[in-house]
Amino acid sequence: MAINADSLAQLRGILVKSKRFVFLTGAGISQESGIPTFRGNGGLWKTHDPAKLATLSSFHENPSLVWGYYSYRQKLISKCQPNPAHLAISKIKEQKKGDSWVLIQNVDNLHRLAGSKNIIELHGNIFKLSCIRCGYSGYMDMDMVLPPKCTNCESVLEPCVVMFEEALPQKEWATSIELSFSCDLVFIAGTSLNVSPVNTLPSYAKDNNAVLAEVNPEETWLSRFMDFSIKGSSADVLPNIYNLMK
Ligand code: APR
Ligand code: ZN
């Protein structure tokens, strides 16, 4: 973990004093649970074309292909467990009590399984599905025939995952903006910050003079704007940050 002791002590002080802090996490935080990222080494988008598998238009053109992709990911993710990074976030939030939130880009449910409360799934949840025609929503049975049909109206059901070309869930997005504008500290862990509009949240926090702390083994385009840019894996760094608080 590349952060000197002074910076770590400074970050600890900020965390202890924080009145409202936010975690903003991405695919990298689940990498050590065995779920590949999208853009890092071995990322999904290096071998799969998101334009064919993860856009609203590809879903309407070929629901079976897109459902095949999401079903493959569900089966992989259902075998994965929260790693020390997810658990550390849950314990930091528990320890601090106060007002803290986790803004999640991943759809893998692992923050919830790690016990984190106050979570906002900005890109949805891969185990849920819904009917855009009649509003039915439910949980995915991984053995169902693909593409699954709505039992109410026979339409093809959609995975409750925000695809490219799709808007984020409005309530969750509005709450995330409000939290970013009103927090005093943001931990940004495991995201390349490549995808909008989620990658605008750190700038809203900065507008409110929040401290930005990034945890990532690699540089991101926002690393130089961070108050703390900690080079390392989230499963290594976040438990260390929790240990500072005890
Ligand atoms: N710990 C922390 N960060 C890590 C780790 C790790 N162990 N391993 C990789 N990373 C970092 C990578 O360096 C990279 O910056 O995680 C980041 C993953 O970036 P992406 O693969 O782009 O994932 P993410 O930022 O979550 O993508 C956002 O894009 O395709 C869409 O919907 C998808 O939610 C996703 C969104
Ligand atoms: Zn329906």
Image (tube, rainbow, N blue to C red):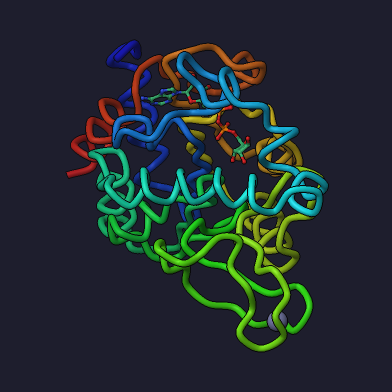
Q: Nearer the viewer, residue 130 or 88?
A: 130
Classify residue 236 by image quadrant. top left
Vertical position of residue 239 compared to residue 67: above or below: above
Q: Position of residue 238 (x, y in %)?
A: 30, 34
Q: Nearer the viewer, residue 56 or 155?
A: 155
Q: Nearer the viewer, residue 141 or 120?
A: 141
Determine the residue positioned at 34% across, 45% down.
16
Q: Nearer the viewer, residue 146 or 16?
A: 146
Q: Position of residue 76 (x, y in %)?
A: 36, 43
Determine the residue positioned at 56% across, 45% down.
105
Determine the residue positioned at 55% across, 57% down.
121
Vertical position of residue 216 compared to residue 166: above or below: above
Q: What residue occupies the far front of the structure in this picture?
A: 145
Q: Position of residue 113 (x, y in %)?
A: 30, 59
State the quadrant of the N terminus. Answer: top left
Determine the residue positioned at 42% across, 15% down.
217
Vertical position of residue 48 compared to residue 97: above or below: above
State the quadrant of the C terminus. Answer: top left
Classify residue 6 by image quadrant. top left
